[in-house]
């Protein structure tokens, strides 16, 4: 069974631009969570989607948004990029929401210049 | 607020020795815990999990111990190998999962 895939793997953007990241969960998994990982803050939860509905949202500004499609694939968008948005963005999928074991993708490395 | 933390940020172990990575949690209501391993350039990889109705669970070369009295979790890796070098995270079942900062394990050949 294929694992979680994320595209693109690397991105370089400039301040003020926007970016869209994509995540395809493990087949059959309906829950997708997004995390931001930085050296200083560790893994920080962004949001979780289950059956196309946002279940949970972390403490991030409204510039960070996401959605989930009927096939469980998910996208996250960051608008008006700031230097501090440079990070590894990780997607994780699980069969059930929240407390179920999450399986991570390789991440998208975003660099904002 | 509730948090999951790690006692040591770095751990160096001789190849062949056993490794012990510790984690403290603060929410006594948490009933599920997970350990992840993250190698450089990769996403976290599930290692082993344990539910609060258990004290110990064993996998292949790994054992997780849960002490609910002191809210402490540990990951033991037997016969540590160079391929075990990575950052290890514990996660606490919350809604959503809460991750610790991570411990970097370095294996000395």
Image (cartoon, coloured by chain):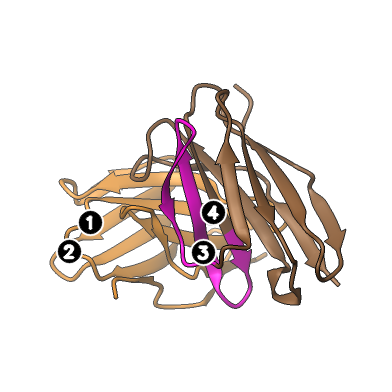
Chain colours: A brown, B orange
Residue B108 to residue B37: above or below: below
Q: Is residue A5 visible?
A: yes
Q: Residues within 10 Å of mark 2 (few under 14, many from 20)?
A: few
Q: Of the two numbered discs 2 and 4 on the same chain, state the one appearing first in sequence.
A: 2
- Mark 2 and mark 1 in contact (Cβ < 8 Å)? yes
| Residue A52 shown in magenta | yes
Q: Pick the quarter of the image with the N terminus of chain B.
A: bottom left
Picture coordinates of residue B30, whole percent (x, y): 23, 56
- Mark 3 and mark 2 in contact (Cβ < 8 Å)? no
SS for callout 3: strand
Identify the main secondary structure in magenta. Answer: strand
- On the rendered structure, is A71 left or right of A94? right
- Mark 1 and mark 4 in contact (Cβ < 8 Å)? no
The residue at which mark 1 appears reads as: B30
Query: Which of the labelled discs sits on residue B37, or is there none?
Result: 4
The residue at which mark 2 appears reads as: B28
Q: Nearer the viewer, mark 2 or mark 3?
A: 3
Query: Which residue is pictured at 56% across the width and 67% down the height?
Result: A61
- Numbered-mark total: 4
Q: Mark 1 falls within which chain?
A: B
Label 3 and label 1: CA atoms lie apart by 19 Å
Q: Mark 3 falls within which chain?
A: A
- On the rendered structure, is B11 left or right of A78? left
Q: Nearer the viewer, mark 2 or mark 4?
A: 2
Query: Which of the labelled discs sits on residue B60, or is there none?
Result: none
Picture coordinates of residue A96, whole percent (x, y): 38, 33
SS for callout 2: loop
Read off the magenta span: A36-60
Q: Nearer the viewer, mark 4 or mark 3?
A: 3
């Amino acid at each position: 069974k294929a694992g979680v895939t994320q595209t693109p793997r690397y991105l370089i953007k400039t301040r003020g631009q926007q970016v869209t990241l994509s995540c395809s969960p493990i087949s059959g998994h309906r829950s997708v969570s997004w995390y931001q990982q930085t050296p200083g803050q560790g893994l920080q939860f962004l949001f979780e989607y289950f059956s196309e509905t946002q279940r949970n949202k972390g403490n991030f500004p409204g510039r960070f948004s996401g959605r989930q499609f009927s096939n469980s694939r998910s996208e996250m968008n960051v608008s008006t990029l700031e230097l501090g948005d440079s990070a590894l963005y990780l997607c994780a999928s699980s069969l059930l929401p929240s407390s179920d074991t999450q399986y991570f993708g390789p991440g998208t490395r975003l660099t904002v210049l | 607020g509730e948090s999951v933390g790690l006692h040591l940020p770095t751990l160096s172990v001789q190849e062949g020795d056993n490794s012990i990575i510790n984690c403290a949690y603060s929410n006594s209501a948490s009933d599920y815990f997970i350990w992840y391993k993250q190698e450089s350039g990769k996403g976290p990889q599930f290692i082993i999990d344990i539910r609060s109705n258990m004290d110990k669970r064993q996998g292949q070369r790994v054992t997780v111990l849960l002490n609910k009295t002191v809210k402490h979790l540990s990951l033991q890796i037997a016969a540590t190998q160079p391929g075990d070098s990575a950052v290890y995270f514990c996660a606490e079942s919350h809604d959503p999962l809460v991750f610790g900062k991570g411990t970097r394990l370095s294996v000395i050949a």
